[in-house]
Image (tube, rainbow, N blue to C red):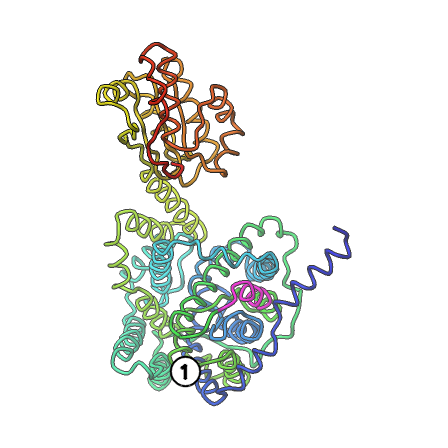
Amino acid sequence: MSVLSCTRSLAGRVASLLPGRSDLADVRRHPRRDLLAGLTVAVVALPLALGFGVSSGLGAEAGLATAVVAGALAAVFGGSNLQVSGPTGAMTVVLVPIAAAYGPGGVLTVGLVAGLLLVALAVGRAGKYMQYVPAPVVEGFTLGIAGVIGLQQVPNALGLDKPEGEQILAVTWRAVEEFAQAPNWTAVAFAAGVAVVMLAGARLRPTIPFSIVAVIAATIVAQVFRLDGAPPIGDLPAGLPAPSLGFLDLGSLGTLLPSAVAVAALAALESLLSASVADGMTVGQRHDPDRELFGQGLANIAAPLFGGVPATGAIARTAVNVRTGASSRLAALTHAAVLAVIVFAAAPLVSRIPLAALAGVLLATAIRMVEVGSLRAMTKATRSDAVILVLTAAATLALDLVQAVIIGMVVAGVLALRAVAKQARMDQVPLDRGEYTAEEQALLAEHIVAYRLDGPLFFAGAHRFLLELAEVADVRVVILRMSRITTMDATGALVLKDAVRKLNRRDIAVMTTGIRPGHRQVLASVGALELLEAHGRVYATTPEAIAGARTHLESGGFLRALPVQQTAVHAREEPAR
């Protein structure tokens, strides 16, 4: 393919990911309802954006910049009509060690590179592979994230500066030790009060944004009573900074690349999960996974230019968007616009919010992320599902999130292969001996045994098959009925070849029936088919194989020859098996 044709193909692919007329038509259908939903989501998103910005190590302004810039671009270019994007707790967990090691420049560089990787994934049609992530991995991942988010808030909830360290459990323990030496009950009261109001309010009046109500109340109390134990966020810039590439840490680009890959993987995973959740909450909405990756890629390329952290689709905010009646991407765009107004018009007020109050918001968010009913159902499903869920959650707490997902996927794959391998069976079946006499049937049964192979014959369970077949009793002919083998790989074919050779060395002839056309190629590639055909022992049907076995036994002197009229097998021809 020429360079020109490759360029045209790439341009066509990118063009297919851009917004079209149908998106504009969707926006025009219910504008009032979408505007109201966007306003509601913005109210919910404000304290979350501030909190996640602080937690990331880049400050509340970084969280707001991300919510505005990434939220707007993902709304326009993303693949879901209902997705709301911005800073999230899962991404914050990944960013904290990057910020500690490389500073703000490292985080912003990672975000931009991750955005480029997401665009490449979209162009490469990688979105469809999201469907292969098992549900227990997702549930364990979500549970682990909730635990990490909650533990990250402990220092602010206790009114302390974050202790040094990257391991979240160790940092949390040191914060508790510091608090025990000099308790700050004011901060604890703010954090606990905000969390309780959010959790209780969500049960009593789910449509009211209690997060913003609780944060406003906490800010008023802190200002009126001038409580020193509840330090505020601090000064925020009135507006977004001018876009700049001055933050790029080109000297550390090589060492930052693995972190960028991790951020891109997490952004893809969480965004596509969130879009799938939105689809499940509605009727008739289906997201385009590749376009969603493209939109998130553009959002993450642009957000660092304005000082924002990497963003993903936000499940909680997306759920609020859907529940409040959003029907198009206008709602998510409105959410970003409202936050932009707040950034430019109310920065001094936002800067007075106590850090402990934001910690309370995130603690409540972490608690609400845990779906007890879903976890209970998943752990009761099968022992394998329970193991995968618990292992993924534990790895999320102990390691980074991408490693946790990889571990969960690997374990899920191994357990799935084990389960599939157990489905392979080799059952002895009675012979269809045709119109032979009772004496002849007894002689055939003495010398011939038939087995039906069911299920997959592949690397995970093939060796067990070899052991079973090699232990066949002392007979003269083994007939293998292979039409029910669902899949066969090179390992399975080699194992079959070895089993045939071992039986042949014991002077046992092996005859096969019903080999599927697709399996012939695999058998031929390893020489198994040639071994069987060398003695003319590959048959289409079982009756033909029995007749061939009879001829083999006669030629070996194990059976006397039948009269001519009985040598033909008059049994009903069965399908190849």
Q: Nearer the viewer, residue 58 or 286?
A: 286
Relative side of 349 to 211, left or right = right
Q: Position of residue 473 (x, y in %)?
A: 27, 19
Instruction: State whether residue 92 is above or below residue 531.
Output: below
Q: State the residue position of label 1.
A: 325
Instruction: State whether residue 312 is above or below residue 538.
Output: below
Q: Position of residue 32 (x, y in %)?
A: 47, 90
Q: Secondary structure at mark 1?
A: loop
Q: Position of residue 455 (x, y in %)?
A: 36, 39
Instruction: State whether residue 569 is above or below residue 564.
Output: below
Please give the name of the residue rendered at 51% of the width and 86% of the height, measured from the top-left corner: 29
What residue range appears in magenta? 287-299
Instruction: State whether residue 415 is above or below residue 187.
Output: above
Residue furthest out toward the top: 557
Secondary structure that dominates the magenta span: helix
Quarter of the image for residue 295 reads: bottom right
Q: Say if residue 8 shows up in the picture.
A: yes
If the image is split into quadrants, where does the C terminus sit? top left
Q: Amino acid at mark 1?
A: Gly
Please give the name of the residue rendered at 61% of the width and 79% of the height, measured from the top-left corner: 21
